[in-house]
Image (spheres, rainbow, N blue to C red):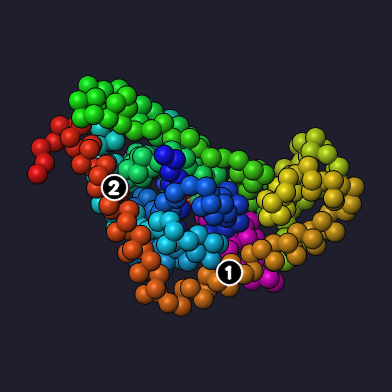
Amino acid sequence: AERVFSGVQPTGNLHLGNYLGAIKRFVELQNSHECIYCVVDLHAITVWQDPEELKRHTREVTAAFIACGIDPKAHIVFNQSQVSGHAELAWIFNCVARMGWLNRMTQFKEKAGKDRENVSVGLFAYPTLMAADILLYRATHVPVGEDQKQHLELTRDIAQKFNTDFAPSIAAYGHGEGYFPLTEPLIAGPATRVMSLRDGAKKMSKSDASDFSRINLTDDADAIAGKVRKAKTDPEPLPSEEEGLKGRPEAENLVGIYAALSDSSKAQVLKDFGGGQFSAFKAALVDLAVAKLGPIGADMQRLMNDVSAIDAILADGAARARALADQTIRDVKDIVGMVRA
Ligand code: TYM
């Protein structure tokens, strides 16, 4: 059976990249798949998080999921730390993955920078926890932005090595060829890598010092309009075909955003706006972004006013996730050779 899993870190400043690259796709997959969407608080603490802020951001991501259209009754929405199987399976995967594999992770290299001696052990082990998130539910498909591609390749490597290392035991317990599926990433559409509005060479990110680099899901109409108008562009008018976007990262980014927000394609957007001035295109983009994001921001605020309702959704989701996770943990303990009741 096909099952979707994905996660978002509760580290604040949820932005248009998170929406177009991930959450909007989460919403679409609900019609065709059984979906599990997780607020990954254990991942968040790989870098320092203020405790009160962590709670607020965990509820905020939950509110964003619901405001964007995820149905927590038909599917599962929960925060990672409420299901202990994530940490348990991550430990086992720490013993399956090789140092060399993790040493190659570009996200770790970027986040650790020069000060390798002073980052948490958790930041290095981040990708094994991510593999555990996915494989705990034996998920077959994972919608993410482009930046997570390498982590999903590692997840497949871990599944493959586990299946091979324990092949006799897996067969003895009646699981056939392999216990874990080789999960497929779902990275598609015109906005798999939304770039900063200030610099077409940098991705839009929660941690960029400039708030003008990103459109936050909580931005109001004035903020959205201001940021789009100030967005960096070049002096040329828009081309009529995609070829013409080559070497113009800022223009390509805005066209991609327009295409994703309007459920269209870059080619179609250029058919409609090609040859025209940037200012006219930007004005249309403001209208579109405000129409699409305005209601989401308003709904998030409304939901955040009732913290206990959000916590009840997370508790209910965690209970249902735990039921699935517990079965995997029992199987894995048997396969690995751990005595259990
Ligand atoms: P996180 O919290 O950084 O981002 C959440 C999702 O948003 C996508 N994304 C983007 N997409 C397009 N353009 C951008 N500029 C952009 N920035 C972020 C990310 O690709 C992601 O899909 N490691 C993950 C969280 C995670 C996870 C998992 C994901 C933990 N366990 C299991 C999938 C499956 C992360 O840091 O996402």
Asked whether 242 falls inside the magenta stretch, the response is no
Q: Quadrant of the C terminus?
A: top left
State the SS at label 1.
helix
Q: Position of residue 5 (x, y in %)?
A: 43, 46
Report if the CB atoms under discs 2 and 1 are less than 8 Å apart: no
Residue closer to the observer: 213 or 114:
213
Question: Relative to 48, is 201 above or below?
Answer: above
Residue in the picture at 24% in, 47% down: 326
Identified by mark 1, the residue type is Gly
The location of residue 107, given as percent across then percent down, is 47, 40
The residue that label 2 is drawn on is 325
Quarter of image, res 252 = top right
Residue 165 shows in the view: no
Question: Alpha carbon of mark 2 to alpha carbon of mark 1: how far?
Answer: 33 Å
Q: Is residue 79 left or right of residue 186?
A: left
Q: Residue at horizontal 51%, vertical 44%?
A: 143
Q: Nearer the viewer, mark 2 or mark 1?
A: 2
Describe residue 139's horizontal placement relative to residue 296 as left or right.
Answer: left
Magenta-colored span: 206-224
Q: Is 210 colored magenta in this rendering?
A: yes
Q: Amino acid at mark 2?
A: Ala
Crowding at label 2, few (<14), some or many (≥20) Cα neighbours within 10 Å?
A: many
Q: Residues within 10 Å of mark 1 (few under 14, many from 20)?
A: many
Q: Is residue 180 above or below residue 291?
A: above
Asked which secondary structure carries label 2, the reply is helix
Residue at label 1? 297
